[in-house]
Image (cartoon, coloured by chain):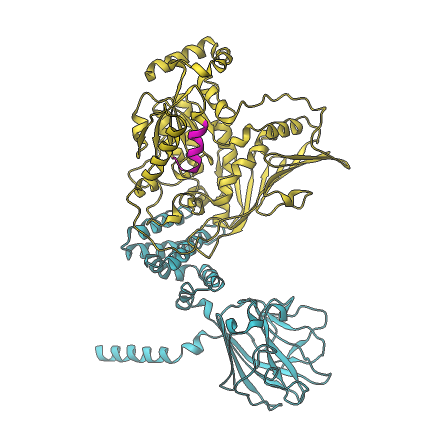
Chain colours: A cyan, B yellow
């Protein structure tokens, strides 16, 4: 019996080890409507039909995620018509997508602009592809866009086409590190189109270990992004933050101290359900138990008192 | 001079009502003040501000500087040297622990220019030992401390002046006169601002404190922290453990003119927004904007000047909006607008508010007369309270509602928790 249990446990570990990628991607398209998406503007540029998102009218409005994303892997499939032209808008403010973010190009190869800086997979006008993808129109392709703090990686059909570090691309230095993700409406002539399906995202800012690494980054705005992500995540970050607070690193100490306060403060608001308040208290208590530094335990006890006051 | 005898002399003056009458006489005999009329002063905290205290007070012929105290022996030695070089007759005792001053019964006045987190306890212990206090702003580190200070002052029948020396200026008194005259109509909005905020201070490593500094005593009732230079002298206001940034540094100076002029009452809500720096260990506001709702008065604090004529040239200021006109001022200047006309003064408004003889003199006179000075403790406490509440709203990142009768936040226990802070052992905030 014991052996079977061990076997089951091992099997469980193997299975879970195989599937985290699939598990942590969230679908952004339900196949029926444009829930999770927004289309600002007067002429709708997109519609849903037969489980596919279709962009047809030229000059229609672009399609943006309701939520903002900082660090993520965004996956989808696309199919371009004969001279189709579209793109993916990354980390942008819908009011000024090209000023705030960048466009990853989706383009039929025989349109006028077809150099490596403007073809499918390029970061349009900023970073050229180094490994040109299959640009056959009329068939489905897979694209994956990874935004990992200052780095961007773009893959088409499983092959990396483009890598960029925004510190090394002068024109990308002031681009936002966070924003919505958008699809550009049909940017070609009337009658052309682009189709999208199987759209999903893995939000790396929802992963405590990933966010924790951001606290050690040198760039202020990258650290700020990690602090914000940690604050948004809340309770799952508390123990990691308490560990960082105990380290002899003034950068992480300062960050962890601030965000621990912010998470606790947030939990004390009157509209937060009691169960959530109790989760914060539990995590603070656990961190306190595992803490050996007087400085850290003093701070955690103080936060614990503040958290408890609101229950 | 024995302390007991001094008290008796003052009680006599107070009960017989000749204290005030005696003052002009004293003023004329400064050059030769009898020892029994001298005020024996001790200074706690001898840094930049404390140095000014020593200079200001020692310049009065009826003041004898009897003791200096600082947790930093270098600063203490410098302060003593500076005093004795200007005033060879001075021979103050020096201490690194203020409790030696508290324990002496031959000291009349303590001035306090320590970091904010020490203000309350030193003042309260001074009151309890029968001493009057000239204390630097802000009044206290926490809202609760202000209340305890007030109760201790009342119980021990002491005199207190907050060190807002700009209060004494003719400009502030004139602004108050003009506004109180009603010439601008009823004031419905006040805008206060101070440019600049906390910078991050970088990420210096922790160090061993210098041997000449008693770091544990510097921290006192504040939470334990390892020493780095920027936490200490001069830049400590960048840390919430000891103060509240540029906002806490300057609120009292400019909110003062609002309290002198319209004395807002009935605060109901506080809504602060802002940001902490992310480029260093400092954690007080890089910028802070606050909306306050008082009874019949809206007050706005901003880190950038408001959009009113002339404000963009002033790094600190107050702008009053009345039904008939506006007044914009800073420490030294004022500009009044009535209809299309703009002016510096309105001669028809009579001068009715008595002018201050100077902030320190006003305090010393109060020590003798036993009538509270202009920036007395209750005035200072009312004026400082909105600052504490704003910083709580800033830290909790939410709008707060306030019960001004019971002095508690409504429906926000965590905000109420932040009205006070437990002292680090062995220090205790006395109960009153």
Q: Residue at x 49, y 28 (%)?
A: B378
Q: Residue A30 in the image: state x and y as whole percent.
A: 56, 76
Per the image, is B54 magenta?
yes
Q: Residue furthest top?
A: B16
Magenta segment's dominant SS is helix
Q: Nearer the viewer, residue B135 or A311?
A: B135
Name which quarter of the figure residue B423 lies in: top left
Looking at the image, is B86 positioned above or below residue A94? above
Q: The magenta stretch spans which residues? A: B46-56
Per the image, is B280 magenta?
no
Confirm whether residue B347 shows in the render: yes
Q: Residue B335 in the image: state x and y as whole percent.
A: 68, 35
Q: Nearer the viewer, residue A276 or B145?
A: B145
The quadrant of the image that shows the N terminus of chain A is: bottom left
Q: Residue furthest right?
A: B340
Q: Residue at x 62, y 90 (%)?
A: A137
- Left or right: residue B339 compared with residue B404: right
Number of numbered discs on residues: 0
Looking at the image, is B261 positioned above or below residue A136? above
Looking at the image, is A20 positioned above or below residue A302? below
Confirm whether residue B322 shows in the render: no
- Left or right: residue B417 compared with residue B374: left
Name which quarter of the figure residue B338 lies in: top right
Q: Residue B80 in the image: state x and y as whole percent.
A: 35, 32
Q: Nearer the viewer, residue B270 or A9?
A: B270
């Amino acid at each position: 019996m014991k052996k079977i249990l061990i076997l089951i446990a091992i099997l469980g570990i193997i299975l879970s080890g195989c599937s985290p990628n699939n598990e942590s991607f969230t679908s952004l398209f339900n196949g029926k409507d444009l829930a999770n998406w927004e289309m600002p503007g007067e002429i709708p540029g997109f519609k849903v039909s037969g489980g596919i998102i279709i962009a047809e009218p030229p000059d229609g409005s672009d399609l943006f995620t309701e939520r903002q994303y900082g660090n993520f892997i965004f996956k989808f499939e696309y199919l371009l018509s004969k001279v189709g032209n579209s793109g993916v808008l990354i980390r942008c403010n819908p009011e000024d997508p090209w000023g705030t973010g960048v466009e990853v190009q989706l383009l039929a190869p025989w349109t006028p602009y077809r150099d490596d800086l403007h073809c499918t997979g390029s970061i349009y006008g900023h970073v050229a592809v180094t490994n040109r993808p299959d640009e056959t129109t009329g068939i489905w392709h897979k694209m994956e866009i990874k935004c990992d703090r200052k780095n961007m990686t773009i893959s088409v059909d499983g092959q990396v086409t483009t890598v960029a570090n925004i510190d090394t691309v002068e024109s990308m230095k002031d681009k936002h590190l966070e924003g919505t993700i958008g699809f550009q409406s049909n940017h070609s002539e009337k009658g052309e189109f682009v189709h999208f399906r199987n759209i999903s995202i893995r939000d790396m800012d929802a992963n405590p270990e990933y966010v924790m690494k951001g606290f050690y980054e040198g760039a202020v705005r990258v650290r700020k992004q990690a602090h914000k992500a940690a604050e948004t995540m809340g309770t799952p970050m508390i123990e990691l933050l308490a560990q960082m607070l105990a380290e002899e690193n003034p950068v992480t100490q300062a960050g962890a101290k601030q965000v621990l306060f912010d998470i606790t403060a947030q939990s004390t608001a009157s509209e937060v359900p009691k169960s959530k308040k109790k989760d914060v208290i539990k995590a603070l208590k656990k961190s306190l138990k595992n803490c050996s530094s007087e400085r850290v335990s003093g701070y955690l006890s103080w936060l614990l008192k503040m958290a408890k006051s609101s229950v | 001079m024995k302390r007991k005898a001094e008290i008796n002399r003052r009680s006599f003056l107070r009960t017989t009502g000749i204290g005030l009458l005696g003052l002009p006489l004293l003023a004329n005999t400064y050059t030769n003040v009898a020892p029994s009329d001298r005020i024996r002063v001790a200074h706690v905290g001898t840094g930049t501000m404390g140095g000014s205290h020593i200079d200001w007070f020692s310049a009065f012929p009826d003041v004898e500087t009897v003791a200096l105290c600082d947790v930093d022996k270098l600063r203490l030695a410098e302060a003593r040297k500076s005093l004795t070089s200007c005033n060879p007759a001075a021979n103050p005792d020096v201490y690194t622990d203020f409790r030696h001053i508290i324990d002496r019964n031959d000291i009349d006045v303590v001035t306090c220019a320590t970091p904010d987190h020490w203000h309350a306890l030193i003042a309260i212990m001074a009151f309890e030992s029968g001493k009057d206090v000239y204390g630097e702003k802000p009044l206290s580190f926490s809202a609760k401390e202000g209340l305890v200070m007030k109760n201790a002052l009342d119980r021990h029948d002491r005199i207190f002046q907050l060190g807002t020396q700009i209060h004494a200026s003719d400009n502030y008194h004139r602004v108050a006169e003009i506004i109180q005259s009603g010439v601008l109509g009823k004031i419905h909005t006040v805008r206060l601002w101070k440019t600049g905020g906390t910078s991050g201070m970088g990420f210096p490593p922790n160090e061993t404190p210098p041997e000449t500094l008693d770091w544990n005593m510097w921290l006192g009732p504040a939470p334990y922290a390892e020493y780095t230079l920027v936490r200490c002298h001069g830049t400590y206001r960048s840390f919430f453990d000891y103060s509240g940034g540029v906002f806490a540094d300057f609120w009292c100076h400019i909110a003062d003119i609002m309290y002198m002029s319209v004395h807002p009452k009935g605060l109901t809500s506080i809504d602060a927004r802002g940001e902490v720096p992310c480029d260093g260990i400092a954690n007080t506001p890089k910028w802070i904007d606050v909306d306050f709702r008082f009874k019949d008065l809206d007050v706005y604090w901003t880190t950038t000047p408001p959009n009113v004529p002339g404000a963009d040239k002033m790094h600190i200021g107050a702008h009053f909006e009345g039904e008939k006109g506006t007044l914009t001022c800073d420490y030294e200047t004022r500009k009044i607008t009535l209809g299309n006309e703009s002016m510096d003064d309105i001669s028809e408004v009579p001068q009715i508010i008595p002018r201050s003889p100077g902030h320190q003199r006003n305090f010393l006179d109060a020590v003798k007369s036993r009538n509270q000075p202009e920036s007395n403790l209750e005035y200072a406490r009312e004026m400082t309270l909105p600052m504490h509440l704003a910083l709580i709203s800033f830290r909790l990142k939410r709008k707060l509602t306030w019960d001004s009768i019971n002095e508690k936040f409504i429906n926000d226990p965590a905000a109420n928790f932040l009205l006070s802070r437990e002292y680090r052992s062995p220090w205790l905030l006395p109960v009153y």
